[in-house]
Image (tube, helix red, strand yellow):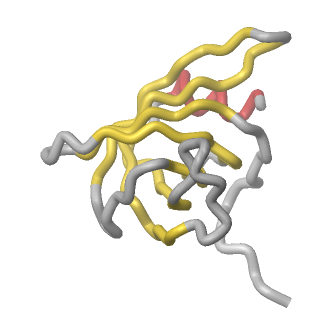
């Protein structure tokens, strides 16, 4: 059995994510596939490098057809090519991002999911 390394549970939801590489200006749009208080997994159109710091704008569901946005800084902890990409959407790559900074209000919103 594989031991889970996360301290908080992952929530599987789909939500829009926009990423900017801190210092490089690379921009990517994607779909978040899961999120926890420590980080998130994203299907994304552009490849970001392992260890790269990214600024993310995340749109999380807050009710029926409504979203709220949060901005977070994170570090890419894994990235790989999506060999099953449909090429019709922003899912050319998968990556995992660990949050570097998270304030109390955002943490409470994530817990409420």
* Residue at figure coordinates x 81%, y 12% from the top left: 63
Say whether residue 85 is left or right of residue 95: right
Say whether residue 10 is left or right of residue 110: right
Q: Is residue 97 above or below residue 108?
A: below
- Between 24 and 83, the one lying in front of the other is 83
* Residue at figure coordinates x 53%, y 29% from the top left: 58
Say whether residue 22 is left or right of residue 16: left
- Between 46 and 111, the one lying in front of the other is 46
* Residue at figure coordinates x 39%, y 39% from the top left: 19
- Between 37 and 40, the one lying in front of the other is 40
Q: Residue furthest bottom?
A: 1
- The answer to whether residue 42 is visible is no
Is the N terminus in the top left, top right, bottom left or bottom right quadrant? bottom right
Q: Residue furthest left?
A: 23
User: Whole-percent x and y of residue 62?
Assistant: 74, 16
Is the C terminus in the top left, top right, bottom left or bottom right quadrant? top right
In the rendered image, which quarter is residue 109 located in? top right
User: Whole-percent x and y of residue 78?
Assistant: 47, 70
User: Whole-percent x and y of residue 44?
Assistant: 51, 49
In the rendered image, which quarter is residue 75 located in? bottom left
């Amino acid at each position: 059995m594989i031991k889970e390394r996360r301290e908080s549970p992952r929530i599987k939801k789909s939500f829009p994510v926009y990423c900017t590489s801190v210092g490089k200006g690379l921009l990517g749009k994607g779909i978040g596939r899961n999120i926890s208080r420590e980080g998130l997994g994203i299907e994304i159109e552009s490849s970001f490098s392992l260890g790269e710091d990214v600024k993310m704008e995340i749109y999380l569901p807050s009710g029926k057809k409504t979203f709220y946005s949060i901005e977070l800084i994170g570090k890419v902890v894994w990235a790989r090519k999506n060999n099953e990409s449909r090429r019709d959407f922003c899912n050319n790559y998968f990556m995992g991002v660990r949050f570097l900074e998270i304030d109390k209000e955002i943490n409470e919103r994530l817990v409420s999911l």
